Image (tube, rainbow, N blue to C red):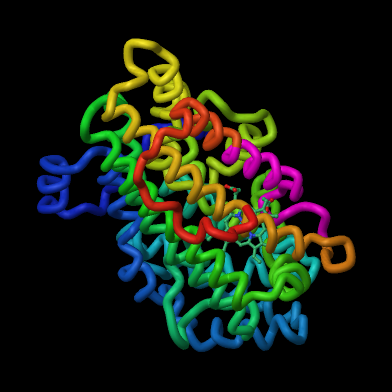
Amino acid sequence: MNPTATPPTRPDRTPHEEVSMTATATPTARCDRSFFNAQAIQALDPFGLDDALADLPALNARADVPALTALLQHMTAQYKHLTLLDAESTHATMRDFGIVLGSLKRHGVEPLSVVPHLEPILLDLGGQHDMVPRDTVLHYTVWNPDGERRRLYTGDPQERELQDAVTNVFPHLSASLALSDSLADLDPRDVRFAPLAMHLARTSEVMVDTIDRVTQHVSPIFFAQTMRPYFEEIHVNGRAYLGPAAAQVPLWLIDITLWASDRSHPAYEHFLQESLQYSPPSWRAFYAAHSARPSLVTKVSALLASDAHQHDRNLLRSADALTALLRTLKVFRGRHLGIARRAYAEDVRLYEHGSGGAPIELLKTITQLTKENEAAVRARVGGRPGGHAPARGEVGSGA
Ligand code: HEM
């Protein structure tokens, strides 16, 4: 899949939507609107299988491969009778196929080897939205209903905690796009830069709150030994596609404008290129628009290094705000690395690599890069007092 592909035109908008969106929204915001019509997607039960899908945890607990296969065959046969008139119903359909795909794979069965007729259907469902031909983390979390209708692999409350964690951060990451877009176009000496960057820092704090909650409520052993096997890759049309795990959470949406466009590392760049395909087309378009531009850290550092600008008060405020943002990301990554290390410790893990296909080493590299960029801006400011509050949870973060 081409990460920079133009988002397809959605045939399902009403004339009213079309008019109001073209009048007010950027292409990015327009596309995100359909992706974040989450309640409508959650409400749908396209196969009428709410009850059968509620039994999945029981089928998985007894590794009932014949029943899982029969369920997937039934859904595949029913597909031609579905009325998929809009984007919401195709996302809900992919979500419901997805939870059964991951279940079968967890028990060692390549799903399309037992239900080959499903392959063209998955290709069609993914292709309609220029997305991968299987479920993504959006299907498994943001588009998954709450309460009794929640699609789950296990009956364990810790699985819900993990899903809720991801659901919680997605709206903030999506909202960050507009802030990053504006920041990328502003001169760091512009009086608006610092307050916008502080908004982005505050928006990012959800990552810290969320990982703290996960650390409190999800045991690394549960993740490593119960959940991780459900996120194994499946093969569609000769290609491997990863399961819908939190590693697909696009924190890179913030990194890319902030520092990663020109201060990255080959390992992170490689991970990012792989991860892009699991994002909606609008986010890939955001990546394409920003990945070749100088990062905010580079722009601010260059201005601070110049005698002509280094005392500019707006610039100093902008640098302080970027430092606060980088600190927040550093705190998240430090704590996230802590739980990941425990889940992938030798005596706990079942797999050497994360569900996103990367080793723990990658997380150390990204955490180190985040720290280095924070230190780079801080060093340029030269310890001048900025007067901004520390990032959430920074005190004693251990990051
Ligand atoms: C028990 C819980 C978790 C464990 C053990 C874990 C582990 C990992 C591992 C090993 C990676 C490396 C990539 C890969 O998987 O191949 C990763 C990446 C990532 N995970 Fe998690 N994770 C957990 C929960 C979460 C949660 C709740 C979030 C966010 C809400 C999250 C966000 C991320 C992000 C954004 C990345 C990409 C790397 C980065 O940007 O720093 N993870 N995770």
Q: Residue at x 41, y 20 (%)?
A: 304
Q: Quadrant of residue 85?
A: bottom left
Q: Nearer the viewer, residue 11 or 36?
A: 36
Note whether 23 is above or below 294 in the view shown: below
**Residue 289 placement (x, y as % from top left):** 39, 28
Visible residue check, residue 1: no
**Residue 249 placement (x, y as % from top left):** 52, 53
Q: Quadrant of residue 271?
A: top right
Note whether 179 is above or below 225 in the view shown: above
User: Residue 353 colored magenta?
Assistant: yes
Q: Residue at x 43, y 45 (%)?
A: 324
Question: In the figure, is residue 345 to the left or right of 395?
Answer: right
- The residue most toward the right is 347
User: Residue 108 colored magenta?
Assistant: no
Q: Residue at x 16, y 54 (%)?
A: 14
Q: Residue at x 55, y 53 (%)?
A: 331
Indicate which quadrant contains ligand 1: bottom right
Q: Nearer the viewer, residue 378 or 168?
A: 378
**Residue 388 placement (x, y as % from top left):** 36, 47
Residue interval drawn in magenta? 351-371
Q: Nearer the viewer, residue 344 or 109?
A: 344
Q: Nearer the viewer, residue 356 or 209?
A: 209
Note whether 337 is above or below 131 in the view shown: below
